[in-house]
Image: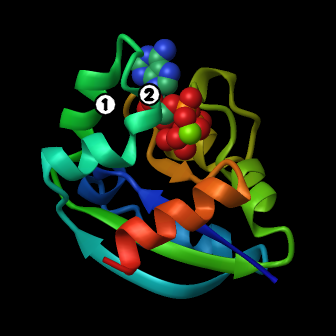
Amino acid sequence: MEQTLSLIKPDAVERNLIGKIVTVFEENNLTIKEIKKIHVTLEFAQKFYEMHSERPFFKDLCSYISSGPLVAIVLEGDNAIQKNRDLMGATNPSEAQEGTIRKMFAISIDKNSVHGSDSSESSKREIDLFFKQ
Ligand code: ATP
Ligand code: MG
């Protein structure tokens, strides 16, 4: 069993998509181990996304993720990290495959509705940031 961090980002929370997105996880054998709705500070967002601090979109990314409440989820299941990434689809929803969360719900590359840890190291780090501090 593996764990991964999912975020339902502010654009999806604002559009009442929490239930629809959680349903995708549950129907694909990912179990909700922890879940909470939280409005993070700009400082927290900067820490969470620190690996992107040199990217041109860093400032907008951090202000967006701290712009309204999000839902943080610890998902558990076989191959949970990769499975969640597959269910999410490509970062840019215009490139996401049919049936993926981003294809179904995302608005744009920045308002792309979900986040998922991309490795076991980032999963540990991100679960710790959201649930163990
Ligand atoms: P996430 O980390 O949110 O799960 P990801 O792993 O698919 O998404 P990353 O490359 O880690 O994508 O980028 C983090 C976030 O930064 C993306 O989800 C997206 O919102 C934003 N982002 C990435 N690339 C761009 C870009 N070229 N322009 C604007 N925003 C971007
Ligand atoms: Mg990422």
Q: Position of residue 18 (x, y in %)?
A: 41, 68
Quadrant of the drawing holding the C terminus = bottom left
The reply to whether dot 1 and dot 2 touch (C-beta < 8 Å) is yes
Q: Secondary structure at mark 1?
A: helix
Q: Residues within 10 Å of mark 2 (few under 14, many from 20)?
A: some
Q: Nearer the viewer, residue 43 or 26?
A: 43
Q: Which residue is rendered at x = 85% and y = 68% of the image?
A: 79
Badge 2 is on which residue?
52
| Label 1 CB sits under 8 Å from any ligand 1 atom | yes
Which is nearer the N-term, disc 1 or disc 2?
2
Badge 1 is on which residue?
61
Residue 109 visible in the picture: no
Q: Which residue is rendered at x = 79% and y = 60% of the image?
A: 83
Residue 31 visible in the picture: yes
Q: Is residue 6 above or below residue 44?
A: below
For badge 2, the amino acid type reads His
